[in-house]
Image: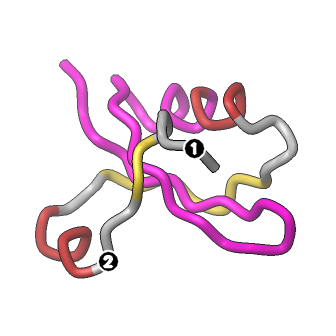
Amino acid sequence: MSWQFTIGLRFNKKADRVVVDAEDALIAALKVKAERPEATIMYVRRSNRRGDTRHPAHTLTEPH
């Protein structure tokens, strides 16, 4: 079963959010870290429909 996780990260002194499909939070964080090794992971949480539609994040495959 796959969930959507929102990962908060800091990259070049800017905060950003990315949405990733993964089986659990650790795998989601590792996917982001593999894509952007210099980024600092600040948090990982399951995505929620209400809050994330107000403040949409982007997916991992979008350009930086």
Q: CA distance from mark 1 to mark 2?
A: 19 Å
Of residues 39 and 2, the one nearer the viewer is 39
Residue 46, x across and y down, in percent: 32, 51
| 48 displayed left or right of 46 | left
**Residue 6: x, y in percent?**
41, 54
What's the residue type where badge 2 is placed? Answer: His
Q: Residues within 10 Å of mark 1 (few under 14, many from 20)?
A: few
Q: Earlier in the sequence, mark 1 or mark 2?
A: 2
**What kind of element bears circle 2?**
loop
From the viewer's perspective, is residue 42 above or below residue 34? below
Residue 55's disc is: 2
Residue 21 is labelled as none
Magenta segment, which residues? 1-30
Q: Magenta stretch: residue 16 in it?
A: yes
Total residue callouts:
2
Determine which residue is flagged by label 1.
63
* Occupied quadrant, residue 56: bottom left
**Secondary structure, magenta segment, majority class:** strand
Q: Position of residue 60 (x, y in %)?
A: 49, 39
Which of these two is toward me, 15 or 5? 15
**Quadrant location of residue 29?**
top right
Which residue corresponds to the image point at 64% horizontal and 50% vertical from the top-left? 64
